[in-house]
Image (cartoon, rainbow, N blue to C red):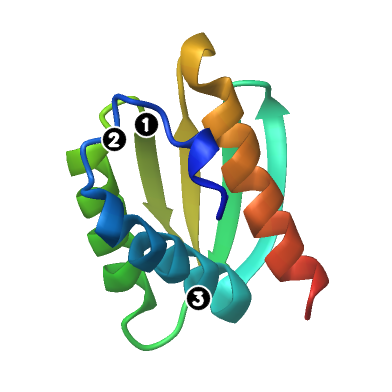
Amino acid sequence: MSDPAWVPQSCTLPTEERPLRVAEWDALFSEHLRSLSRPRPLRLRLDVAVGPGVEERVRDLVERESGCCSFFTFTTTAGQDQVGLEVSVDQVHEAVLDALAVRAAAAVEQR
């Protein structure tokens, strides 16, 4: 996900801000991601451990990401000890979801 080649042209986030956004996702994954699964090729399920401000952080990141990458569909589900985050894309953007899944899995493995 650090290679700019995976970013589709439909992403409207300014190029200079993209590394910062990737870093935000990385930090969320490395600090709070419990598990991930790929129930379908175009859907990624992330389970994020809750803590002070984590749910708000997830919702804020999702809102900002939706603003620049309208091809993502995010669904958050608050639970007692985790926030479920489902990310889905259309067929055209499957490679972007693949890159996000690889990034998340790497963060979990590094712990």
* Label 1 vs 3, first from the N-terminus: 3
Label 1: few (<14), some (14–19) or many (≥20) C-alpha neighbours in 10 Å? many
Residue in the foreground of this view, choosing between 67 and 54? 67
Q: Position of residue 5 (x, y in %)?
A: 52, 36
Identified by mark 2, the residue type is: Cys
Please state if 105 lies on the left or on the right of 58 as rendered.
right
Q: Position of residue 25 (x, y in %)?
A: 46, 63
Say which residue label 1 marks. Answer: 72
Identified by mark 1, the residue type is: Phe
Residue 26 in sight in this render: yes
In space, the residues marked 2 and 3 are separated at their CA atoms by: 19 Å
Identified by mark 3, the residue type is: Ala
Please state if 30 lies on the left or on the right of 69 as rendered.
right
For residue 49, above or below residue 105: below
Say which residue label 2 marks. Answer: 69
For numbered disc 2, what is the local secondary structure? loop
Residue in the foreground of this view, choosing between 20 and 42? 20
Say which residue label 3 marks. Answer: 27
